[in-house]
Amino acid sequence: MSDPGPKLLVIEDEPEIRRFLRVSLQSHGYRFLEADSGKQGIMHAATEQPDLLILDLGLPDMDGLEVIREVRQWSRMPIIILSARGQEQDKIAALDAGADDYLTKPFSVAELLARLRVALRHAAQSISGADPVFCVDDLRVDLGSRQVVVRGEEVHLTPIEYRLLTTMIKYAGKVVTHRQLLKEVWGPDSVFETQYLRVYMAQLRQKLEKDPTRPRMLLTEPGVGYRLTAE
């Protein structure tokens, strides 16, 4: 017998969207739990122990941000936001509260499935220990030897460029906010120095991307932060 697929919990108050997600995700081997309110969803999250949470922010009984904060008190399971709120401040607030990723409605099933795979793989690596070698596209980073290779040739990075890259690798596939990157790379006193980040991200793209003006690995999430592709 084959192993059961990952168990997903969807907290969404619109029946049509829940039905659409149920059919789409079950057809790809996922097990499906659902809740139409924040309180019911938190109860399912605590008792059913899902592998990943898909959460709408606009719930009838409580704001989705409250659900994130509540779940983050006792669980590190991946949380993907699926919401009609598409403003930059909404995305930043959700990511800062502890969400791992953010998709705006309307969304494509293919993109949601890709985000699910990345989030679940990242969660598994966090449990088992991250692979000492990270590879994506033309980039290979040996975290043990601190060696960075692009298209078969070793690339020299400054200490800050390397720290920025390894921070992006740590969250590969996930959106990382400007504030979070600045805090982890430059320290808590630099969270508002976004110009630092733009300069060093441009330098990284110059060294790592085939066409820095059209990056394929180090992607910008406008107004929010950056994402390192993971597949």
Image: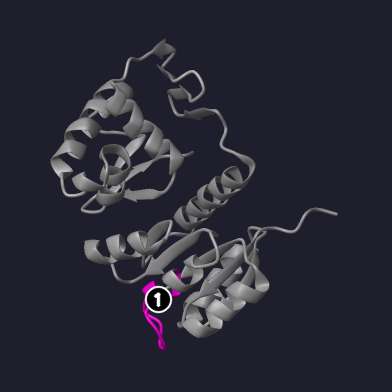
Q: Is residue 138 above or below residue 58?
A: above
Q: Is residue 165 above or below residue 79?
A: above
* The N terminus: image quadrant: bottom right
Helix, strand or loop status at disc 1: helix
Residue 150 placement: quadrant:
top left
Image spot of residue 52 (x, y percent):
56, 62
Could you tell me which residue is drawn at 50 percent across and 50 percent down? 114
Colour pattern of the rendering? one colour
Q: Residue furthest top?
A: 153
Amino acid type, callout 1: Glu
Residue 187 placement: quadrant:
top left
Could you tell me which residue is drawn at 54 percent across and 69 percent down? 21
Could you classify mark 1 by the number of other residues whose Cα lies within 10 Å: few (under 14), some (14-19), or many (20 or more)?
A: some
- Left or right? Give the position of 16 relative to 107: right
Image spot of residue 47 (x, y percent):
66, 75
- Left or right? Give the position of 213 relative to 185: left
Could you tell me which residue is drawn at 32 percent across and 34 percent down? 164
Residue 43 placement: quadrant:
bottom right
Q: Which residues are magenta?
A: 57-68
Image spot of residue 155 (x, y percent):
35, 15
- Left or right? Give the position of 109 relative to 23: left
Image spot of residue 217 (x, y percent):
36, 34
Residue 220 is at least partly visible in this image = no
**Residue labelled with disc 1:** 66
Could you tell me which residue is drawn at 38 percent across and 38 percent down? 168
